[in-house]
Image (cartoon, rainbow, N blue to C red):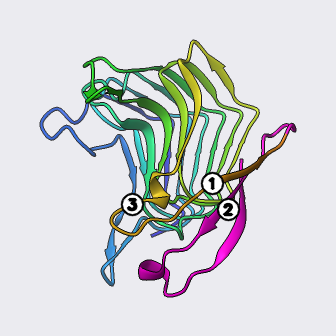
Amino acid sequence: NGSNYVVNSKIHTYALRNKMYRAGVNMSGGYANDQKTGGVGNRARYNEIYNAPHNAVLVQANNMIVDYNKISNVTRECVDCGAIYAWYQWQQRGNVYRYNIFKSIKDTVGGREGNHQLRNIGVYFDMDVDQSIIYGNIFDDVSTGVLFNGGRDTTIENNIFVNSNEPLYLGVAGMTFGSNTMRNPIVDVSKTTPLVITTQREHNLGRYGEVTEATIEGV
């Protein structure tokens, strides 16, 4: 499915019974030929999404645009979760998240895993999400503004972070997922704006068929 729009809507106080992964706007779609697909070229804009236990927007697709939305007081009953959450697909490319306002996205349940404080995140790219743009957003009172957990070719530029404990978190969970580990050392960090972080990755034999090395850039 493609070219579908959710526009000028108020979406709130939802997911009252099934609380997890019941987003206000779901762009993660269904399955085709045993592959998860959310379509191409769908858009969510000028919406207000608020007061929910988990996600506001789920994305697992290509060429989606999420813009001019006001998202507040979501992820209220979870940790390690994002107001906008995208995940698990190398082939997810061309998605744009711009000119949104994120307000009061934070831990309200005291979530920890051992001694590790878990996060509530404005935009959460989990496990190998590629070639997305996060541009011109405002993150106000958001525990972690943007979490990038692997993947490549993503730009995070000209955003404003206010009262955030952690504006940007760079992780490598997507490089070490399951039993197939890929090392991801940081090779270089630029002094430019936008910031360019270059990593070197060695592909694992069991997952990719042969060992190769490559230098990739992420922003």
Question: Residue 166's image quarter?
Answer: top right
Q: Is residue 112 above or below residue 154?
A: above
Mark pair 2, 1: CA separation: 6 Å
Magenta range is 191-219
Q: Are marks 2 and 1 in contact (CB under 8 Å)?
A: yes
Asked if residue 2 is positioned above or below residue 116 in the image, the reply reads below
In the picture as drawn, the residue positioned furthest to the left comes out as 17
* Residue farthest along the top direction in this orientation: 163
Indicate which disc residue 177 carries. Answer: 3
Q: Is residue 73 above or below residue 82?
A: above
SS assignment at label 1: loop
Query: Looking at the image, which residue is at 57% across and 81% down?
Result: 211
Q: Is residue 206 magenta?
A: yes
Q: CA distance from mark 2 to mark 3?
A: 17 Å
**First-in-chain label (3 vs 1):** 3
Q: Is 133 on the left or on the right of 14, as rendered?
A: right
Q: Position of residue 69 (x, y in %)?
A: 55, 33
